Each structure stands twice: as C-alpha cells, then as structure tokens.
Amino acid sequence: VYMGAQLPALLRGFYYEGWHPGRRAIARNRNSFLDRIHDGVHRDPAVDPEEVARSVLGQLADRLSAAEIEEAKAATPRVLHDLWPT
C-alpha cells in the first residue's frame, strides 16, 4: 500500500483502481446523471433524483470552503452546476 501511494496517479489507477484508458468515454448529461441516482435509490417513484442530488451537494457545500466548492463545481459538467446551492 505504501508503494502504491508513491506511484503517479496514472499508474496507481491502472494497478489499484482498474482504469482502462482504451475504453471509449461515456457521454454524460444531466438526465443520465439523474437516472444513475434514481437507479441508486431502487427506482422508488416517491424519490425525486434531482432533490437527492441537491441535498447531497448541499451537505457537501456545508462542509467545504468557498474555494473548495468552486473547485468541485469546476470539475463537474456545466449542466450540473445549477444543482449546487448558491
């Protein structure tokens, strides 16, 4: 484990995290993101996946600094930025 922590991120990803860079990237959009959340709550019709996403991101925002929130937002697709609290 200690040696793995010393590896560059790319090599660590190959060996420890199962990265497969040859695979084609999957196009992501807002609906596919919310569908994944809906699948995660076992497609319960009473659960609004957008509300779940807003709640989770709100909890994160409560625990992060403003700079960390901006960094996290910058790492997410623009179509999801409005899910973050203002």
Image (cartoon, grey):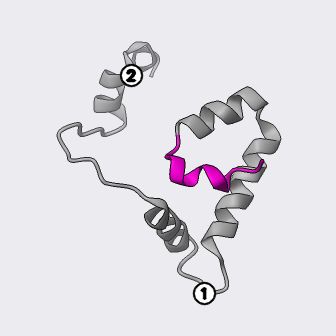
> Residue 9: which numbered mark, if any?
2
Pointer 2 local density, CA inside 10 Å: few below 14, some 14–19, many at least 20: few
- Which residue is drawn at the image coordinates 61% and 71% (left, top)? 49
* Residue sitting at x 53%, y 81%: 43
Specify whether 35 is left or right of 85: left
Q: Which mark is residue 64?
A: none
Q: Position of residue 9 (x, y in %)?
A: 39, 22
Determine crowd level at label 1: few under 14, some 14-19, many 20+ residues with C-alpha closer than 10 A.
Answer: few
Mark 1 — residue?
A: 45
Decide which of 12, 62 is in the foreground and name it.
62
Q: Is residue 2 left or right of residue 12?
A: right
In the image, taking residue 14 as reference, residue 40 lies left or right, namely right
* Percent coordinates x, y for residue 8 in the rendering: 37, 16
Q: Which quarter shows the N terminus?
A: top left
The residues colored magenta run 76-86
Which residue is pictured at 61% across the width and 49% down the height?
A: 81
